[in-house]
Image (spheres, coloured by chain):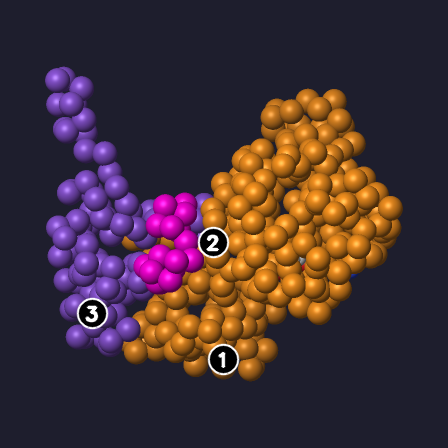
Amino acid sequence: MYVKRLAVIGAGTMGADIAYVAANAGIPVVLKDVQQEVLDRAQRHIYDLFENRVKRGRITGEQAEARRQHIQYTTENGLLSDVSLAIEAVSENLDLKKSVFRELDQVLPPLSLIASNTSALPISALASVTGRPDRVAGFHFFFPAHMMKLIEIVQGEETSRETVETLRRLAEELRKIPVLVKDSPGFIVNRVLMAAMAEVLRFQEETGVSYADIDQAVARAKIAPMGPFVLADALGLDVTLEVAETLAAHYGERFGPANQLQQLVKQGHLGIKSGHGFYAY
Amino acid sequence: MPSDWEQQLIRRFTLATFLEAVRLFEEGIAAPEDVDLAMRAGAGLAEGPFHWADARGLDVVLEELEMLAAEVGPRFQPPASLRERVQRGQLGVRTGRGYMTYVRRSRRQTEEGE
Ligand SMILES: NC(=O)c1ccc[n+]([C@@H]2O[C@H](COP(=O)([O-])OP(=O)(O)OC[C@H]3O[C@@H](n4cnc5c(N)ncnc54)[C@H](O)[C@@H]3O)[C@@H](O)[C@H]2O)c1
């Protein structure tokens, strides 16, 4: 199948960027949210992203305008009746996502695909509330989606080959890099990243070497773009702790969140967003 | 020259990364090529964990893991797929095959010359 027109459900941080990426590749998009003010904010954000490309000489003003016109903003389901794919990017909550999947299953054409941008929820659980589990998959962008090249295509228990192939072709059309991963907690990137982070936290606890020294050593060795403590502060320590706990519950103690992390979160130190985490801001 | 603690940190970081990557492969969740692509494009690593190990030599990686398992803890125990490859003499880039396969330039050149 070929995706001629797609819908993005949820116009928050990720949804707005995903709609931009599709429009920029020339694919018509319906961007839906339940709040009009979120749609207005998304529209301004997308306008800025296109203006940036014009400023940097990548596209002309006319091209930017034409591509912007590819996006229709809506709070209704009416425009969804002829899309061949919906990418769900609503808030990370299983019950909410299930209800969105049930609704999409009702309003989309029967042969359309439904993909979720979830970072951590099981795809098979979402697929199971629809009458088309073979046409459901994960399509996991990374933040910020207008820059990050990777898309993890997540194969649920019943996801068909054809669904995977359609999504793979779409990812390439969006000028992204697709990889295939079977449905499992953390998929590829978050799982491997958190395993390394947990090990570094243990090292820190055992040796007492400072966070800054460790971050600098990792940067100096050029093995990662930034040290794990800078990264965790940027992601949010509460988010990092939750991911570590989920992974520990599934895969065991090697992911067990370290004491430093638990204590910081208990004290309300959540990283950059609260002004204090492993570092003070 | 990095200090002792720095070397130990880098060793634990890179080997923990590699071991988790190997679990994804052994559990049938993702292919080595896809894991490497994902870690470069999604996490900004300079090199994917499988290519890192193949380039270093799987025999070398095996030895390092055995050392760390003894020093730090059994979580660094070398995985089965690594032992198998080393036993079969599939040591990575140097032998043309490890977790991934590599076209050996010298052989291809002789083939082309024939
Ligand atoms: N932010 C990240 O770094 C990141 C990265 C990768 C994946 N994700 C995933 O992307 C998804 C969205 O995350 P986000 O950060 O964009 O969240 P967000 O809170 O910025 O946006 C979610 C949007 O969904 C809307 N929404 C809620 N219920 C809806 C419904 N029934 N129909 C339509 N819209 C509805 C909300 O109004 C909100 O605008 C989550 O599953 C998250 O795990 C986030």
From mark 1 to mark 3, how far is it between C-alphas?
26 Å
Tell whether label 3 touches label 1 (CB within 8 Å): no
Mark 1 or mark 3, whichever is nearer to me: 3
Mark positioned earlier in the residue sequence (1 or 2): 2
From mark 1 to mark 2, how far is it between C-alphas?
30 Å
User: Residue A106: x, y in percent?
Assistant: 80, 55
Name the amino acid type tagged 3.
Answer: Leu
Say which element carries label 1: helix
User: Residue A105: x, y in percent?
Assistant: 75, 55
Which chain letter matches label 3?
Answer: B
Question: Crowding at label 1, few (<14), some or many (≥20) Cα neighbours within 10 Å?
Answer: some
Task: Quickly name the residue at label 3.
Answer: B68
User: Residue A205: x, y in percent?
Assistant: 34, 77
Q: Residue at x 25, y 70 (%)?
A: B76
Q: Which chain is purple?
A: B
Q: Is mark 2 within 8 Å of ligand 1?
A: no
Q: Is residue B26 magenta?
A: yes
Task: Quickly name the residue at label 2.
Answer: A181
- Say the numbered circle drawn on residue B111: none
Q: Ligand 1, what quadrant?
A: bottom right
